[in-house]
Amino acid sequence: MSLVIAGRTAIVTGAASGIGLAVARHFVDKGANVMFVDIDEARLEDQVGEEARAEGPVRMFAGDLREKLTITNLLSATVDAFDRVDILVNASRQIATSDPLCPEQDAVETLLQQNLLTSLRLTQLTAKRMIARAEKSEEKPAQVGSIINLSSIAAIRTQPELLAYSISCAAVEQMTRSMAVALAPRGIRVNAVSFGSVMSASLQNALKDAPGLRVAITERTPMKRIAAASEIVETVQFLASDAAAFMTGQVVTLDGGRSLIDPACAAVH
């Protein structure tokens, strides 16, 4: 199996922090060209601004991907910089707690827009670019592109205050399956990674504020630990590479067995 992604071009959203940043950094380390994308321009500048201006394998794009024009501009900027798009990682996610019995404040519409529709629209427009390039190519490659969505075990294990987040994650996973079937004949694979607690910056801050949280998480995880960010990014690399060439429409779960035994799924991060 070949896990090589060197020379390929990836768009990674949510790349100014957290898992998105970890994925984007890992891809650069593995030799890929990467467009770092985030709505937070200041944080993007802090993370990769100098590298992006060096005109090497790193570029950055700041904008609100809820707007179709922003997505169009992102794809144009990526093609202008690297001449192609081979990989899309939809890593931008928003988590919100809310009152599930309050229609005006349950956050469902907000998280469906942010977590589902942004990923769906970017997937659709990126796939069109991938297909157009493949049709112009004399080689007619069997593998045209790979799209990876990030989800959470909240899609199947939830608690009431995570209603909106759970619904949006479940929708992302069904979108993954639907787009996989639609795009398979065109040589584009679509998969997802669903994870439980990962030692991201947000969880590190949460652990500082709630000393008992680590114990609560590990007690509910059969493997008795929290995942390292590297374990997520390496799985994303696998899905992006030719090692997963016959894999599409799948949701790979990385949670240390937590979703198997914990119906409450407390403290999802």
Image (cartoon, rainbow, N blue to C red):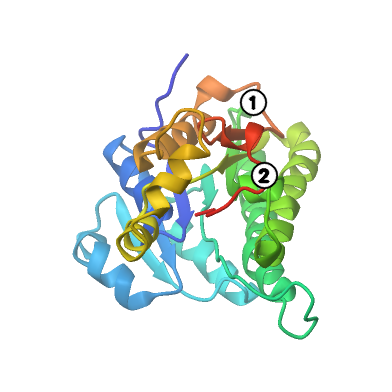
Q: Residue at label 2?
A: 131
Q: Residue at label 1?
A: 142
Label 1 vs label 2: CA separation?
A: 11 Å
Q: Is residue 200 above or below residue 257?
A: below
* Amino acid under disc 1: Ala
Number of disc labels? 2
Q: Nearer the viewer, residue 259 or 183?
A: 259
Q: Nearer the viewer, residue 227 or 181?
A: 227
* Amino acid under disc 2: Ile
In the displayed image of the protein, which residue is found farthest to the bottom? Answer: 104
The spot of residue 52 in percent (x, y) is 26, 62
Query: Residue at left 46%, top 28%?
Result: 223
Query: Residue at left 62%, top 45%?
Result: 153
Q: Is residue 247 above or below residue 106?
A: above
In the displayed image of the protein, which residue is found farthest to the top? Answer: 1
Q: Mark 2 falls on what kind of element?
A: helix
Do the residues under discs 1 and 2 have CB atoms within 8 angstroms?
Answer: no
The spot of residue 119 in percent (x, y) is 63, 59
Which image quadrant is residue 140 in? top right
Q: Is residue 99 left or right of residue 227?
A: right
Please say whether residue 136 is visible from this viewpoint. Answer: yes
Which image quadrant is residue 205 in? bottom left
Please say whether residue 16 is visible from this viewpoint. Answer: no
> Local crowd at mark 1 within 10 Å, few (<14), some, or many (≥20)?
few
Q: Is residue 222 left or right of residue 46?
A: right
Query: Residue at left 25%, top 58%?
Result: 55
Q: Is residue 63 above or below residue 225?
A: below
